[in-house]
Every structure is written in structure tokens, then in C-alpha cells.
Image: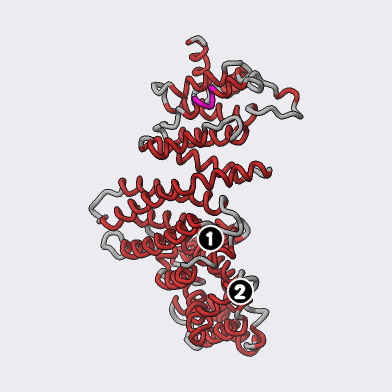
Amino acid sequence: MSAYDKEKLISLLRSQITQHLPDIERSNALDTLREVERHPNYCRLLLEVLEDRSLDNNTRLVAMISFKNFVARHWKKRARIESDATPLHDNNEEKSWLRAGVLRLLDEENRVIAVQLALLISKIMRCDFPQQWPQLQPTLIELLERGTEIQKNRSLLALHYILKEMVTMTLPSQKRNFLELSNSMRQGCMGMWAYYGNDLLTWLQQWNPQQPHSAGEQKAQWCLLTTKVMQRLVVDGSPAADFGPVSVQFLEQCFQVLVKLQELYLQATSTPGVSVAEGQEPHPVVEMLARVMKRHLKLIVNMQEVHSDAFAELPSFVPFLKHVLQALQLMKSPVHRTVLVMPLRLMLEFLQHCLSARDCSERYKQVLDGILAGNNGEALQQLVSMLVLDFLALTQTELQDWDTSPEEYVYESEEMEGSGADLWTVRHTVHNVLLALLEQYNEAVCLLIVRIQQQVMSQPLGDMQSLLNWDCVYQAVGLACYSLPKFLDFNTVLGPCVVSNLQQA
């Protein structure tokens, strides 16, 4: 392997990121690079470039992406493609050397390159683990337990992408490998999750607005990464019928962390200099809290979707459901809805799943009826009133968007509604929760909507708040339109109101 070969490859790699090169020259360089892929030493040369930390990060990043793409296309021969053969296919000794070399890179300082490295490892894993690559799991465990801080982080990042790749593998033997890997890694990763989660919570409890938030951001990154890994290990890596003691312990602690994060969020937003205001960018620490809350809630909602019955048997299920109802009440202000779009949406989605599971699970029915229908339906009354009058109301930001361009506002709303759940606003999720409530407690919810309609429409249509309340009532009536005729005369009650509103408009 000559120095000239390495330099020539570096030149080809740099030609892919050189901005001043004409398009034709860049295209020629790309064609040449594809021809070089057939060279017996191509992957060794790429690995040599990656191990040379004196090179600039852009060149090394292109080398890492090229290595990853080569593995995706050529690491394992595809039988139906005759032209797919490369010198690497039958060279097990060369592959073994490359796999060992890739693991040596798990101390990469640059995060962008480290992400591509994790993807590269996951793609090799898909073809070779565990038969041809038995060293992968022991190496990761060793680095996670005894490695440096950067090695632990990069190994955890690699494990995240490995698990993400394994979830998509469908053969029975592959699923068995995934469950075995999850069982062996769950306990150790839970210890890391607890450590970094407590580290972040401690920092947040001691933080004040005069302190820089950079240290907290680093702790939050660790917390988010360990939570992502635990989501794969617990949600996807648990048998359908049973969580197991480690998973139960993890979810119990996850509930506790969420309660603490909510307390810290409310505490932070009431601090002078940090308090949030609608239409303004939130403080970095508030935004950090929102991200960490979102990740933990996403894990819980995902767990509830995948393991609905076992989830309802958790000791903290009932307290957590009560906490969600309380949290929605505490954070119903438009200010919080602007900052906590995803956390609030996920709380509402959690509630929607509970309602949807009520018909097919005695446990859900017992818990929901005890909380919502108990005490003469006081909790249900508070919930419906909050959903209709608070969460359906337009925020100041949305009103400004409407005033600026009504057509664009309607277009973006329709695009969001038809684009998949992750992009839905809080209001779209409230629609689903109200529909689920109507399905489970039809008569009670209809009577509550009629009562809200009577209260709101008895007030004169004067200021902006009364106008927003009327809009909320129209939305609620529209959602319940198939059930309300038994409780409300549309022609004599709503018809004149609509005509009057249109005349005043």
C-alpha cells in the first residue's frame, strides 16, 4: 500500500467537497471513485484515511460516508446481481481486519463523523453479527464499562443504531439474536440511563439564570442518548407478554423522572429572566427541558402502543394517568402550548390510547371509569371543559398567522393534518381525544358540551376571548355532531347563533 495510493484517494475524496470545481470535473471524480471501489485495497485505504487524525474533518467525513455506502452495496454479495462481485466478497480475512479497524475508531471526537461511523457499524452488523463478528458485543460492553468518556458516548451511539437496524430484521434467527442482545445489554444500559438522568436532574435543581447552560446541554445529550437506547431495549427488545423486572423498574423510574421534569419546567418558567412568553424564543434551559420531556414521553407512549396490556398492570400506571390529567391542567396556558407542543401532544396521545384500549381491556376500563366517572364525573367534566375551552382555542401566534395570510394558514393546517401524527399540532390530538371520549362516555360528554355551549353563547360576543370561546364551541359541536341531535336542537339553537355571528362579522 503506497503513500501515493493514499494521497490519490484523498484527492478524489476532496474533489467531492471542493466548491470551486466545475460540475463536469466533480462528476468525473465521482465516476473515478466508483471505479476505485473495485480496487482490492479500497476499504483498507479508506480505513487508513479515517485513522489519520491529522487530516481535516471534511475529508474524513467523505471517507466515512464512502465506506458506509460501499458496505451497504457490496459487503454481502447479492445473488441476483451478477455484476455485483468485488474482491471483498470472498475475503473473510480482509473483512475481519476491517471490522477490527472500524471498532478502533470508537474514540472519534467529531460527532458528525461518529454518527456515520455508528451507521457503518450497524450495516456491517446486519450482515455479519453474530456468526462472523462475535467480537462486536464484548467490545461494546468493554467500552461502555471501562472506556473513556468519548468511547462510552460513541459506543452508546453505535449501540443505538445497531438496535435500530436490528428492529427491521425479520428472520426468526435475527429476531432471536435481537432479543438475546437486548437481554444482555438492558441492565448495564439502564445503569447508565439512571446515572446520566440523575446527573441532569441534579444540575437543573442547582441551576440559576446567571450560570451558563452549556454544561447542562452536554448532560442533556447524554440523557437523551441513553433514553433512546433504553427505548429500543425495553420497548422493542421485550417479549410481548411480559416486561421482566428490569423493564418494570426502568418504567417506574421513567414515570418518576417525568414528574420531576415537569416540576422543574414549571419552576424554571416562573423564574425572572427565564419565564416564557408567547411569540418569543424560550430560554435554552426551558427548551432543553422540553426536549428531555418529549423523549421520555415518546418512550412511554411507544411502550403503551406495543405492550398495552402489560403496561396497564404496572404499579405506577394509575398514579401516572392521574399525573397526566393534572399536568394538562397545569400547562393549558397558550404559552406552554407554544413551548411544549410535543410533550403536550404526547400526553394527550397517551390519554387517547387509554380510552381506545378501554373496550378490550378490563384493566383500562376499571381505571378510567374510576378516575373519570367517579365522584359524579367531576374529573370528566374538568377534562372536557379544559380540552374544549383551553386546548381548542387559537393562540396569539396562530391569530397573527391568520391575520397575515388566511389562505396560507388554512393550507398549512390542512397539510399538517394529512401528514402523519408526528407533525400534528396539539389541537389535532385534542380532536382525537374528544372523539375517543365521545365513544366511551357518549351521553355524559354530549351533555357537557351542551352545557359549555349554553354558558358560552349566553355571553355577548364582545372581546377577543369571547370570540375564541365561541370558536371552540363550534369545533366541539362539529366533532360531536352525530351524537348531539339527541341533546341539542340545531335549527332553533345553533342556527340563529351562526347567522348572528356571520352578520356581526
Q: Amino acid at mark 2?
A: Glu
At label 1, counting other C-alpha atoms closer than 10 Å, the crowd grade (few under 14, some 14-19, many 20 or more) is some
Q: Secondary structure at mark 1?
A: helix
Q: Which residue, given by chain and number where applicable, does mark 1 sit on?
A: 301
Residue farthest toward the left in the current orientation of the protein: 210
Q: Nearer the viewer, residue 473 or 480?
A: 480
| 412 sits to left or right of 294 | right
- Find the magenta span and give its range: 97-101
Q: Earlier in the sequence, mark 2 or mark 1?
A: 1
Classify 61 as above or below 41.
below
Residue at point 54%, 67% (across, down) = 312
Residue 49 at x, y percent in the picture? 47, 21
Q: Can you see residue 225?
A: no
Residue 280 at x, y percent in the picture? 37, 58
State the colouring used for the structure image.
secondary structure
Number of on-image labels: 2
Q: Can you see residue 446?
A: yes
Q: Amino acid at mark 1?
A: Val
Q: If the image is split into quadrants, where does the C terminus sit?
A: bottom right
Does the magenta-highlighted stretch encompass residue 421?
A: no
| 382 sits to left or right of 68 | left
Q: Secondary structure at mark 2?
A: helix
Residue at point 36%, 50% (across, down) = 195
Q: Which residue, given by chain and number where applicable, does mark 2 sit on?
A: 362
Residue 393 at x, y percent in the picture? 49, 72
Residue at point 53%, 47% (across, down) = 183
